[in-house]
């Protein structure tokens, strides 16, 4: 069976954001299964989309997106 085709997205992140990704992946990992930073990003996307679909925390996300650290300039 052929592998499922996936879209690739490249983004530029800060060193602090990379450190957060690494820390989160490490904390979610167990001796039986290592979690990758890509898996953390996919999980975050699903969680944000679910929360927005339920109308939760939309204003908080908008405020976060207004900060200089998260904007695509």
Image (tube, rainbow, N blue to C red):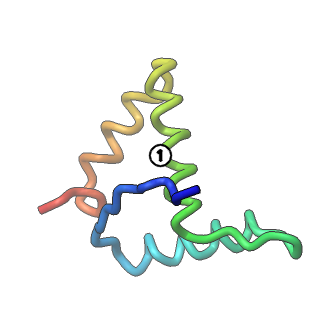
Q: Is residue 66 above or below residue 71?
A: above
Q: Secondary structure at mark 1?
A: helix
Q: Is residue 48 above or below residue 12?
A: above
The location of residue 7, given as percent across then percent down, is: 35, 56
Q: Residue furthest front?
A: 1
What residue is at 55 percent from the left and 39 percent from the top? 47
What residue is at 87 percent from the left and 71 percent from the top? 32
What residue is at 58 percent from the left and 75 percent from the top? 22
The quarter of the displayed image where residue 13 is located = bottom left
The location of residue 67, given as percent across then percent down, is: 27, 53
30 horizontally vs 3: left or right: right
Split into 4 quadrants, where in the image is the N terminus? bottom right
Relative to the observer, which residue lies in front, 66 or 8?
8
Circle 1 is placed at which residue position?
45
64 horizontally vs 46: left or right: left
Q: Is residue 45 above or below residue 40?
A: above
Q: Residue furthest right?
A: 31
2 horizontally vs 8: left or right: right
Split into 4 quadrants, where in the image is the C terminus? bottom left
The location of residue 21, given as percent across then percent down, is: 54, 69
Relative to the observer, which residue lies in front, 26 or 58?
26
Task: Give the mark count.
Answer: 1
Q: Residue furthest left?
A: 73
The quarter of the displayed image where residue 33 is located = bottom right
Relative to the observer, which residue lies in front, 47 or 9?
9
What residue is at 74 percent from the left and 73 percent from the top? 34
Q: Residue furthest bottom?
A: 15
């Amino acid at each position: 069976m052929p592998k499922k085709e996936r879209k690739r997205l490249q983004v530029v992140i800060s060193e602090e954001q990379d450190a957060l990704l690494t820390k989160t992946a490490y904390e979610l990992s167990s001796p039986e299964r290592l979690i990758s930073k890509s898996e953390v990003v996919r999980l975050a996307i699903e969680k944000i989309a679910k929360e927005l679909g339920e109308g939760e925390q939309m204003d908080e996300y908008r405020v976060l997106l207004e900060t200089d650290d998260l904007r695509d300039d």
